[in-house]
Image (tube, grey):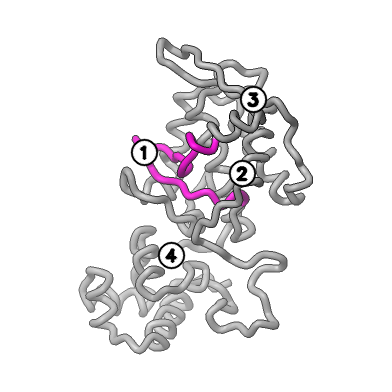
Amino acid sequence: MLTTMTEIGNRLQQLRKAKKLSQAELAQQLNMSRSVWIQIEAGKRNLSALELIKLSETLQIPILDFISDSPATQQTNTQPLIDTYERIPTPNLNLPKLQNVLLYLFERCAGNPNITETALCIFLYFADFNHYEVYHHYITGAAYHKIDGLPVPMQLNTILADMEHQKLITIIKTMHNNLPQRRFIPLQKANLAQLNASEYHIIDTVLQQLLNMPEIQLKAYAQNDMPLRATQNKEWINYELALCREPPYVLVEDTEEF
C-alpha cells in the first residue's frame, strides 16, 4: 500500500494520464484550480474525503486504487485484489441475507425494550460499512440514505412488512420517550448458514460495541462516522467513504492519511 503523499501524488498522476486528461481538464471537473491539482500530484496537498469521492466518480476508479500497490484497474484476471472478495462499492441488495441479518439483530435485541428502530438501522449500517472497510464487500448489499443525519436502509419499511406477511416477525407498536415506536419480535430463528465467518464476526463485534450504548450517544456516534459526515442529508451514502474513516472508527489502519 502506498503510504506517502508523494507516492499517492504519483499514482494520481498516472491514473489521470491513463484517462488522457490534462491537469487543467481534471481540475475543472473537480471544481478546483489547476494550481491546487498540481500541488496534489506533487504530494504537497491532501485530498479531503469529499474530493476523494468526486475524484473516484470522475475517473471511474475505486478509491482504494489510489493507494493500492496493485490497483484493480492495472491487474489481470489472474491476480485478484482481495483474497476472497471482489470490491463492489455499488449496492446490490441480497434480500434473503438482509432478512436473516435482521432476524439475528431482532434475536439479539429482543431482551432490550429500549432498542428502537433507529438503533437497528444504525447497527445494520455499521455491520455493512465495517465489513466493507475491512473486506471491501458489504454484507447485505443494502443502499443507505442519510435522513435527519442518520443512516436508513432503502425500502426498509417494505422489507419489514413483507417479513411480517411471511410470518418471520411480528411488529408491535409501542411508545418510547413519549414517541410512537415499533418493536420487532422474531418468529423464526435466523439462518446463520447464510453468513460466512467474517460477516458473523463483524455483526457480533458491532453489537458488542453498540448494543448497550444509550440512544443519544449512539446517534452522535453514528453521525460522526466519516461516511455520514461526508454525505448531505437525503443523499445516498457511498460505501467507498468507509475507506476514508478517521479514529476511533478506523478498523484497518494506514500509516498516513491523504
Mark 4 residue element: loop
Q: Position of residue 159 (x, y in %)?
A: 54, 38
Q: Is residue 21 magenta?
A: no
**Up-down relation of residue 141 to residue 149 (above or below):** below
Q: Which residue is mark 1?
A: 147
Mark 1, residues whose alpha carbon is within 10 Å: few (<14), some, or many (≥20)? some
Q: Amino acid at mark 4?
A: Phe
Proximity of marks 1 and 3: CB atoms separated by less than 8 Å: no
Mark 3 residue element: helix
Q: Is residue 142 magenta?
A: yes
- Residue located at (61% from left, 28% from top): 211
**Up-down relation of residue 81 to residue 245 (above or below):** below
Q: Earlier in the sequence, mark 4 or mark 3?
A: 3
Q: What is the CA distance from the residue labelled 1 to the residue labelled 3?
A: 23 Å
In the image, which is nearer the foreground, mark 4 or mark 2?
2
In the image, which is nearer the foreground, mark 4 or mark 3?
3
Q: Position of residue 46 (x, y in %)?
A: 37, 66
Q: Which residue is mark 3?
A: 109
Q: Position of residue 14 (x, y in %)?
A: 43, 85
The residue stretch that appears in magenta: 139-159
Q: What is the CA distance from the residue labelled 1 to the residue labelled 2?
A: 20 Å
Q: Which residue is mark 4?
A: 258
Mark 2 residue element: helix
Q: Which residue is mark 2?
A: 98
**Up-down relation of residue 235 to residue 67 (above or below):** above
Q: Amino acid at mark 1?
A: Ile
Q: Amino acid at mark 2?
A: Leu
Q: Nearer the viewer, residue 238 or 214?
A: 238
Q: Position of residue 246 (x, y in %)?
A: 48, 50
